[in-house]
Amino acid sequence: MNKKLVLISIAGVQNFIEQSRGTKDFFINSKLIVDYVMNIHKGVKAMTTIEEMNTIIPLNLDSEYGIPNYLLFECESETIDLENEIREYLEGYFENEKTFLRNVAQELDVFIVAENYINEDYRQIYIKVYEKLELLKKDRFVDRRILKEVETKEIIGQKCTLCHKREGTEDNGKEILCSICSEKRVYIKEGYPSTELIANFKKDCKNNYYNNNIKSDCVEIKPKENKYYALIRGDIDDFGKHIAGLYLEKESDLIKHQQALNNEINTFACKLKNALDESIKYNNEIKKFDIYLGGDDFIFFCPLIHLFEMLEKIEMQRIQIFEKESEREITFSKSVMIAHSSTDLKEVIKYSKERLEFTKEKLKKQGKNGLAISLLTMNHKFRTSTIKGNQLKLVKDLYDEFEKGMSQSIIQELERTLRLLGDTIQNEYYLLNSIIENETYRIISKKSKASQEMIKLVIALLEQYKTYEHRYTTIDWDGYFNMLKIIERISKKEGTYNV
């Protein structure tokens, strides 16, 4: 028997989940991924040619939360080409599975790497496995799907509205779907909230009372409907380096570290799910807002009234759960996409993903840990701004102060005045800084009954958009004023309805 380390990685997970036109597609695609990973693990464990299988990641498959898109395990096997044998076994396994998972097996690439232990320790063999995985990913000419789709005739009509790969055969008047995407729609029969319901979510008052008169009163005084909601997504910064133990002491036990980190991720996902459930007391119509709480990333819907509450809970759970085992702590980069409920969900998802990637790249030299907040209005006007995640309290404090008195007109006058100073300061920094502070006080005080605290916060926010390099100071006016305008809009009840 030869001892081997095996890594099975499923690629294209986020792209698969994001093949969605409505919230139901979003939820179902996520559930399909989780079930697919669980079944791959189940199938591999059933192989008779694999003995003494020791699963390193994931440790817990009892919960659908915190499950990564890969499997890592040690085993004993006499098979020379274990990679191909696992692939062939899974091919037969999913060929006999129900239609839904068979369809997933035809969609996603699955990379399988197996390496023999010779004289290497676990750390060395893990690096070898990971490097081989990266090489396989670069070879884009090899079909890595477990099942190959039956070749279809050339597409003559319209392509499927969801996947854009196959010919649409079913037209329901709003969209044209291929048979596979149409089948996915019935994978789970439970109801899902629409973006309209998510945007208009309020603490359920009428179901908390037994008196019918009180119930009717609650309905009658219901405020104007909200039209905007948030899609929050995030993932662990430099997760590959953390899981590989690159920030650990060399003598540390890498397997224990990986399993501990996996347990922490699982705990974080479950706690995040509980926090979301606790914040959003579901009524009979709204059952779940979480889309995917996976191995190192998450994505979920959030009503605007709970936006900062949930962002604070993410940070609180991060601090409480992830132990600092090295010089580099675990951080999350996050993207908050605020959109009108009538906006095409595909567009919202696309912007959300792009802003997360942009944020990670922009703050790469600063350790990442970024927070992007973006607004897509009903008329497709787009605003976005990026700030360090540790400045969430500053943004939240501004939000609270803006509720008391701030307007777009004040921000616009401030913008017209301050942009005249230019975006690069070379000399006389202190003089220009004094001018900026004085003008901010003058304009805001003249136009509103703003508190001194609000003005101080507006000035403090600008510091987050300054870059100091040698003798130059550069100011990102676009990011600064976009953040002010976004906060002002969502801070007002009228604003959240008519952004």
Image (spheres, rainbow, N blue to C red):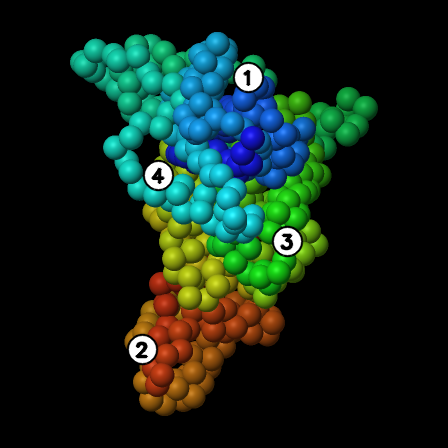
Q: Is residue 339 visible from the viewing direction of this image?
A: yes
Among numbered discs 3 and 1, the one appearing first in the sequence: 1
| Image side of residue 66 versus residue 85, left or right | right
**Label 2 amino acid?**
Thr
Figure check: 358 above or below 203 = below
Closer to us: mark 4 or mark 1? 4
**Residue 461 location (% of width, % of height):** 50, 69
**Residue position for label 3:** 253
Which mark, residue 188? 1
Q: Residues within 10 Å of mark 3 (few under 14, many from 20)?
A: few
**Label 1 amino acid?**
Ile
Among numbered discs 3 and 2, the one appearing first in the sequence: 3
Closer to us: mark 2 or mark 1? 1
Distance CA(mark 3)–CA(mark 1): 42 Å
Figure check: 436 above or below 409 = below
**Label 3 amino acid?**
Asp
**Label 4 amino acid?**
Leu
Distance CA(mark 2)–CA(mark 1): 55 Å
Quarter location, residue 152: top left
Whether tag 3 and tag 1 are in contact, CB under 8 A, the answer is no
**Residue position for label 2:** 424
Closer to us: mark 2 or mark 4? 4
Quarter location, residue 167: top left
Quadrant where the N terminus is found in the figure: top right
**Residue 76 location (% of width, % of height):** 57, 31
Q: Residues within 10 Å of mark 2 (few under 14, many from 20)?
A: some
Q: Is residue 290 visible from the viewing direction of this image?
A: no
Distance CA(mark 4)–CA(mark 1): 34 Å
Among numbered discs 4 and 1, the one appearing first in the sequence: 4
In what element is the residue under mark 3?
A: loop
Closer to us: mark 3 or mark 1? 3
